[in-house]
Every structure is written in C-alpha cells, then in structure tokens.
Amino acid sequence: MNQYGARALEHWRRYAPDRVAELESPEAFFTDLGAEIAGQVSELAARLENNPALMLEMTRSSEQTYLHDAARRMTARRIAEEVVMNQLAWVHDPSLPLEQAREEWEQTRPADENLIVWAERTQDAPYPVHSSAELEEKATEWALPVEFLEGLLAAEIPRQYMEAHADVLAEAATIRFLREVR
C-alpha cells in the first residue's frame, strides 16, 4: 500500500470505522485506492506543470534555475495531491447513507450558477478566446462534455442554454457526487 492508500485508510478508520469493518479486504481496497490516487496525481501534476493557463509562472526562460524548476514541479504535485485526495479519499462522513450523503453534498457543492458567471465573463472579455486546455480542465472539474461548455460559451444567453440542458447538468452532478463518495 502506498502513502495515499495509507493516508486514506487512516482517515477512514478515524471517521468511518464501521465502513472500514464492512470491507471484505481493507488492505486490498486501500491498496487499489492508493494506486488510483497516485496515477491521477501524476497525471494532474504533469498537466499543471505544463499548462500556463492552470499555474502561474510557468514560462521557462534562460534565467530559470534548477531550483525554480524544482519548486514549480513540487507546487504542481502538492496541488494535484490536494485535488485528487479531496475527490477520492477525504469524504466528510463516509459512514452516511448514500441518500444523506447526497443531500449534504447538494448543500455544499458549487452552484451551477458559477458556470453561467464563467460563460458570461468569458463572453464579455475584450478577447473572448479560451484555450482548449481550459475547456478540458473545466469539463473534467464539472464532469461535463467539452461540447456542452462550447455550446454554453456560444449561447446568446448562457442561462437559457443551461436550462435547456438541465438533464446534462443533473447527470454531471451525479458523476461529481459519486467521485467524492467513492
């Protein structure tokens, strides 16, 4: 079991001992979870390291030293670890029944209104250009197809577009919820 699996196991033993006891093989479960977390951390860290839209000070110059490069990579890895652990391991109360957990999640999740604000802000920008990397990141974060976000940005009235596609938003919310309780 790697460090991520061990940290998740410790967290679950503390906050949901009953759920850990119900697992057929906690060692195997947290070994697999740790491996999944490690893979996602590596993938996200690489994307953060190489995507200027996602991190500040990403431009390489001849003046950039080894220490700057190491600090940039370490920062990307720490951010990736925090994001992935929050998605896969740090559930607030993993012992809640699924319905109660969903209710709690619905009360604390980011509002769909944030997407409307993002789309309107992007449309109102003097240069309304968005990178495909930014769209892919937002699509992953919100569990939405990139095409949905492109349609949202192209819509004359983003709120109407979202209302017309409420079923896509509801499915995406379910996916995001399941990512957190997994």
Image: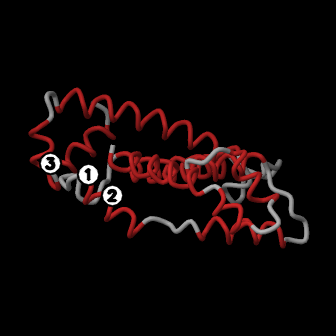
User: Is the residue under label 3 in contact with that under label 1 (CB below 8 Å)?
Assistant: no
Q: Position of residue 34 (x, y in %)?
A: 34, 35
Residue where numbered disc 2 is placed: 102
Q: Secondary structure at mark 1?
A: helix
Question: Measured from the top left, where is residue 59 in percent x and y?
Answer: 78, 52
**Sequence-earlier tag: 1 or 3:** 3
Q: Quadrant of residue 5?
A: top left
The location of residue 124, given as percent across then percent down, is: 84, 73
As drawn, the label of residue 48 is: none
Q: What residue sits 58% from the left and 57% below the top? A: 166
Dot 2 or dot 3: first in sequence order is: 3
Q: Residues within 10 Å of mark 3 (few under 14, many from 20)?
A: some
Within-10-Å neighbours for mark 1: few <14, some 14–19, many 20+: few
Horizontal side of 150 relative to 168 (left or right) equals right
Q: Does residue 155 lie above or below 137 as drawn?
A: below
Which amino acid type corresponds to the residue marked 3 in the rendered image? Arg
Depth check, mark 2 against mark 3: the one in front is 2
Q: Residue visible at 76% across and 71% down?
A: 121
Q: Amino acid at mark 2?
A: Arg
Q: Residues within 10 Å of mark 2 (few under 14, many from 20)?
A: some
3 up-or-down from 169: above or below? above
Report the quarter where the C terminus lies.
top left
* Distance CA(mark 2)–CA(mark 3): 21 Å
Q: Left or right of 153: which side holds 3?
A: left
Pointer 3 residue:
13
Residue beneath the point at 28% across and 60% down: 92
Q: Which mark is residue 98?
A: 1
CB atoms at circles 1 and 2 under 8 Å apart? Answer: yes
How far across and how far down the image is residue 7, in percent? 27, 45
Q: Disc 1 versus disc 2: distance between alpha carbons? A: 6 Å
